[in-house]
Image (cartoon, rainbow, N blue to C red):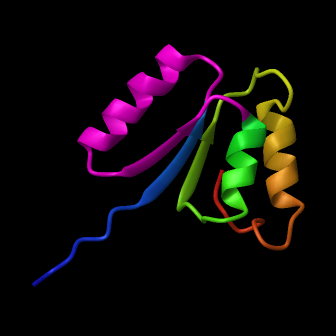
Amino acid sequence: MTSEYSPKIFIVDDSEVQLVLLEKVLLNDGYHVNGFLRGNRLYTALLNERPDLIISDIDMPVLNGFELVQKIKSSLDTKNVPC
């Protein structure tokens, strides 16, 4: 029995339409995808699970994309997660 590794991607976008479209494209290409509508929700999930990649919108309320990446890169536990 062989098992193929499916890279895990976290996506954050405050536009649900954009988020769903990108999720569908990535799922069709075989990626495991977790989508979030808010940067702070992605960051909370990141404390429990490590994706292989994070894709972030820039212009979002509460925690914008720049702030989110800065927060991720400033933590010893998450600084090596590609964004």
- Check the image and report above or below for 58 versus 30: above
Residue that appears at 76% across and 20% down? 59
What percent of the width, then of the height, locates residue 1?
Answer: 10, 84
Determine the image quadrant of residue 12. top right
Q: Which residue shows up at 27% across the image and 51% down it?
A: 30
Q: Is residue 14 above or below residue 40?
A: above
Tell which residue pokes out farthest to the bottom in this image: 1
For the record, the magenta segment spans 13-38
Q: Number of marks in the image?
A: 0
Rendering coords of residue 33 (x, y %): 43, 47
Q: Is residue 15 magenta?
A: yes
Q: Residue at x 73, y 63 (%)?
A: 47
Task: From this view, report whether residue 54 is shown above or below residue 21.
Answer: below
Residue at 33% over, 62% down: 6
Q: Is residue 5 left or right of residue 20?
A: left
Q: Position of residue 10 (x, y in %)?
A: 55, 47
Against 74, residue 67 (above or below) is above
Residue farthest to the left, as pictured: 1
Image spot of residue 69 (x, y percent): 79, 47
Describe residue 47's horizontal placement relative to residue 32 as left or right: right
Q: Is residue 1 magenta?
A: no
